[in-house]
């Protein structure tokens, strides 16, 4: 039941912060760009705008930026 429009982003641990994920997934080039997008309400977590750069994301959470959606995948969640 995987959606081909959602990219899986595997992480090593059971949690990653929103700013870190944006960089890891290639959705932004650096932390400054991540902070700006988040501050301007352009990042959705699980379908809702989230303005917390330090928001903790876990297995199965989705993040959408500029029409591109990624889903967190952890070793424990596989």
Image (cartoon, grey):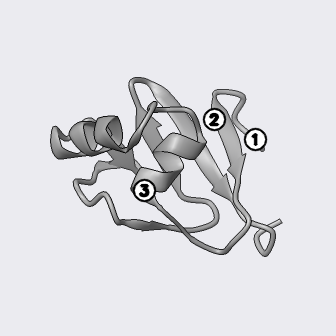
Inter-mark Cα distance, 3 to 1: 22 Å
- Of the pair 11 and 5, the residue shown nearer to us: 11
Which residue corresponds to the image point at 51% horizontal and 42% vertical from the top-left? 23
Mark 2: secondary structure: strand
Q: Position of residue 58 (x, y in %)?
A: 57, 68
Which mark, by number, is residue 64?
Answer: none
Q: Position of residue 17 (x, y in %)?
A: 46, 63
Which mark, by number, is residue 18?
Answer: 3
Nearest to N terminus: mark 2 or mark 3: 2
Which mark, by number, is residue 6?
Answer: 2
Q: Position of residue 68 (x, y in %)?
A: 50, 27
Mark 1: secondary structure: loop
Q: Which residue is mark 1?
A: 2
Left or right, residue 58 beside residue 38: right
Which residue corresponds to the image point at 46% horizontal and 31% vertical from the top-left? 29
Q: Is residue 9 visible?
A: yes
Q: Which image quarter is the C terminus in?
A: bottom right
Relative to 54, residue 30 above or below: above
Left or right, residue 7 beside residue 32: right
């Amino acid at each position: 039941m995987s959606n081909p429009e959602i990219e899986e982003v595997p992480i090593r641990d059971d949690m990653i912060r929103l700013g870190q994920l944006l960089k890891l997934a290639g959705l932004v080039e650096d932390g400054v760009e991540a902070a700006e997008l988040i501050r301007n309400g352009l990042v959705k977590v699980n379908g809702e705008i989230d303005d917390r750069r330090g928001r903790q994301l876990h297995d199965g959470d989705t993040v959408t930026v500029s029409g591109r959606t990624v889903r967190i995948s952890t070793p424990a969640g596989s």
